[in-house]
Structures are given as structure tokens and as C-alpha cells.
């Protein structure tokens, strides 16, 4: 893949659920939230990994280059740059979540909060 693909929040969630249900180590899907710590900590998509420069080594240690990576930000703009960067670093299946976390919430998909 030379570039990332766009994916709707619903389809992203379905991929995550399918990956978790199958427990297939060969086909792992993950959603990475690139928003700042305060917004991520307040609420984020269920099962999301908070991807930052500091957490990137942990991300690399736990994910293969053929895993499906779905990148989410606030509105689906900043995530495009991160998604393309992941592709350039060798990840083969990278998606930008269209509309970001705002669209995720509007679709009433599961979120995690500390409350």
C-alpha cells in the first residue's frame, strides 16, 4: 500500500470487533487515537491505543506491519498525516477514520471514559 485508505467509524469498529472475536494473532486490528492526553483521557473509542511519540516504541513492540491500523483524531484531518507516516514507515494496512472522534460519537459507537 502506497497510501492510507479512508474508513467510516462504523466499519472501523466492525473490524476491531471482528479481530477481537476471532482472536486471530495473524490478523490484528487496532484503533489508535492521536488526540492530546487530556482529550484521550476524558473519552476515547473503546479499546483505542493512545499513540504519541512517547508511546510509539510500545506500539511497535506490540503490532506487526501487516496489522490493520485505524487512526483517529478530532475530526479526521490530523489523522491523515499520521496515517501516511505509518504507511511510509512500513505499515501495510492503514486507515484514516473519516470524521474522527466527533463522527465516532455521532455514530454512537462505544467509548471508554474514566467515569
Image (tube, helix red, strand yellow):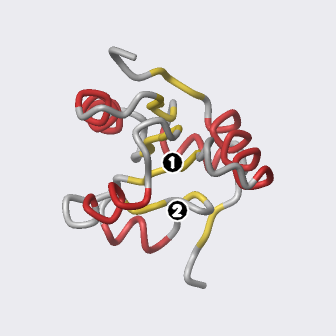
Q: The C terminus lies in which quarter of the figure?
A: bottom right
Vertical side of 16 occupied by 1: above or below: above
Residue bearing mark 1:
101
Q: Secondary structure at mark 2?
A: strand
Say few, some or many: other residues with alpha carbon within 10 Å of mark 2 (under 14 / 14 to 19 / 20 or more).
many
Residue in the picture at 51% in, 35% down: 97
* Image-based side of 33 in relation to 27, left or right: left
The image quarter in which residue 46 lies:
bottom right
The residue lying furthest to the front in this view is 26
Residue bearing mark 2:
44
Q: Do the CB atoms of the residues marked 2 and 1 lie less than 8 Å apart?
A: yes
Vertical side of 44 occupied by 33: above or below: above
Report, in whole angstroms, how far the alpha carbon at label 2 lies from the one at label 1: 7 Å
- Of the two numbered discs 2 and 1 on the same chain, state the one appearing first in sequence: 2
The residue lying furthest to the bottom in this view is 115
Q: In front: 42, or 87?
A: 87
Q: Position of residue 70 (x, y in %)?
A: 49, 40
Q: The N terminus lies in which quarter of the figure?
A: top left
Amino acid at each position: 500500500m502506497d497510501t492510507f485508505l479512508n474508513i467510516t467509524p462504523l466499519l472501523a469498529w466492525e473490524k476491531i470487533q471482528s479481530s477481537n472475536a476471532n482472536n486471530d494473532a495473524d490478523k490484528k486490528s487496532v484503533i489508535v487515537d492521536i488526540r492530546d492526553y487530556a482529550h484521550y483521557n476524558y473519552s476515547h473509542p473503546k479499546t483505542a491505543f493512545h499513540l504519541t511519540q512517547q508511546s510509539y516504541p510500545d506500539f511497535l513492540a506490540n503490532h506487526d506491519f501487516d496489522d490493520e491500523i485505524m487512526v483517529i483524531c478530532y475530526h479526521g484531518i490530523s489523522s491523515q498525516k499520521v496515517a501516511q507516516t505509518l504507511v511510509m514507515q512500513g505499515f501495510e494496512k492503514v486507515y484514516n477514520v473519516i470524521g474522527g472522534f466527533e463522527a465516532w460519537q455521532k455514530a454512537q459507537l462505544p467509548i471508554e471514559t474514566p467515569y
